Image (cartoon, rainbow, N blue to C red):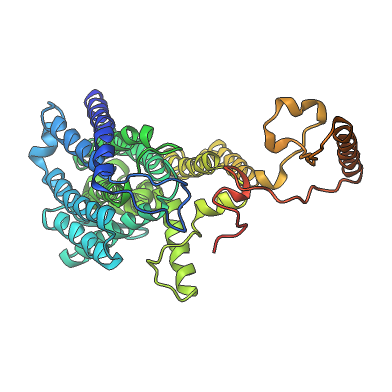
Amino acid sequence: MREYLLTLCVTAAVTYLLTGPVRKFAIAAGAMPEIRARDVHREPTPRLGGIAMFGGLCAGLLVADHLASLNGVFELSNEPRALLSGAAVIWLIGVLDDKFEIDALIKLGGQFIAAGVMVMQGLTVLYLPIPGVGAVSLTQWQGNLLTVALVVITINAVNFVDGLDGLAAGMVCIATAAFFLYAYRMWFRYGIEEAAPATLFAAILMGMCLGFLPHNMHPARIFMGDSGSMLIGLVLAAGAISITGQVDGDVLKLFTGGERNATHAMLPVFIPLLLPLTIIAIPFADLVLAIVRRTWQGKSPFAADRGHLHHRLLEIGHSHSRAVLIMYFWSALIAFGMVAYSVAKESMWFVLLIVALSALGLLLLLLPRFTPRAPRWMEAFVPPRYRRRRTQVVASSPAAAADGQKASEAVDEARDESGEEDSAPVPAGVNGATAVGPRSRFN
């Protein structure tokens, strides 16, 4: 565990230290695109943050190769080299897109190439646990196609959710933390050596996200761009494929007495590992909804819009920071809930806890719909959004100002007695339904 933590810290430190120089390079290189209609930020912000994240990835793999316990991962498996090769391809495609805005189909082709590079070097799905059947050995073509599909879908799921400051990096970091806990448990407790590369990938991915987040939290000083979002999506998919596709059913039957019984016992664990989209369910749901929405409107599935989940949170009244924190909450609930279910699936307390946390999440989602109004004597101690708005009167004399103030107070008292809500339009600002502009709906 100490060596994993050391690798994580080195990756985070290198990523953090490289992000500052990368930001200056992005500004000098002109990688600051114009603000688009779907963007939330108000000022041009440099991209290319994926350069620093890729540097952190290389540093983490280099340090792990020189550690006593983790060196065996590189000697016994070719998966770290496969990951580095695929990451280099997808990172290069992302850098070109951040600078030159390449076509979406070209990016999709690059994603297939990156997945194919990893498959050619042995990072592929070999076994698939099927309920009631056991661990089914896949043919070479079946494993390769499934691997490519999982990599491409996961990359696009993470890329689609990268719409608010700190959102993609934080959500992937949360999902990876849950992934790391169980991958380490499989490797350390059950002695499954095939889980060691996935545990290393998870530690490095957490370091990449944690090192970049201080520069990317609202208000962001730099964006990761496609070079970063596609990179962390690929690393996340590679870890899930590594631990799921390399575990043989013959190993599992040592613990539960039979291959079929072993699959039943381990199925709650294999669900989030077999399908990385389960552990990043929020980005995947956003991806599916975006494709359905755009296709229904007669647009290309790759056409950008402002109908993503994080945009909807802003629309119903959440501030930028609160929308990000809500997405963090749901990601943590799903990711850690899946891992905890695999460990304590028979505990009733666990089920009740998940239900209570889900109810809390729904309350947080609907919070802007039930914004309370504070009494007048508390208005000085609460945020402005909880105060009653007063009609501003422009007066030319103190007497007129006093009359206007009395009239305003009379109107406020009448509204308080009748319970009528203030119907004055909310000006554009950083909070509420006008967080991204004066329009009340996203077009």
Pick the residue in front: 412 or 408: 408
Residue in the picture at 37% in, 42% down: 169
Taking the image as shown, residue 300 lies to the left or right of residue 190, namely right
**Which image quarter: residue 256?**
top left
Q: Quadrant of the C terminus?
A: bottom right
Task: Report the number of numbered marks.
Answer: 0
Residue 195 percent coordinates (x, y)? 23, 41
Residue in the picture at 23% in, 40% down: 25
Pick the residue in front: 154 or 99: 99
Position of residue 326 relative to residue 309, above or below, is above
**Which image quarter: residue 209?**
top left
Residue in the picture at 21% in, 53% down: 90
Q: Quadrant of the N terminus?
A: top left
**Which image quarter: residue 141?**
bottom left
Residue 125 percent coordinates (x, y)? 22, 56
Residue 13 percent coordinates (x, y)? 26, 28
Q: Residue furthest front?
A: 396
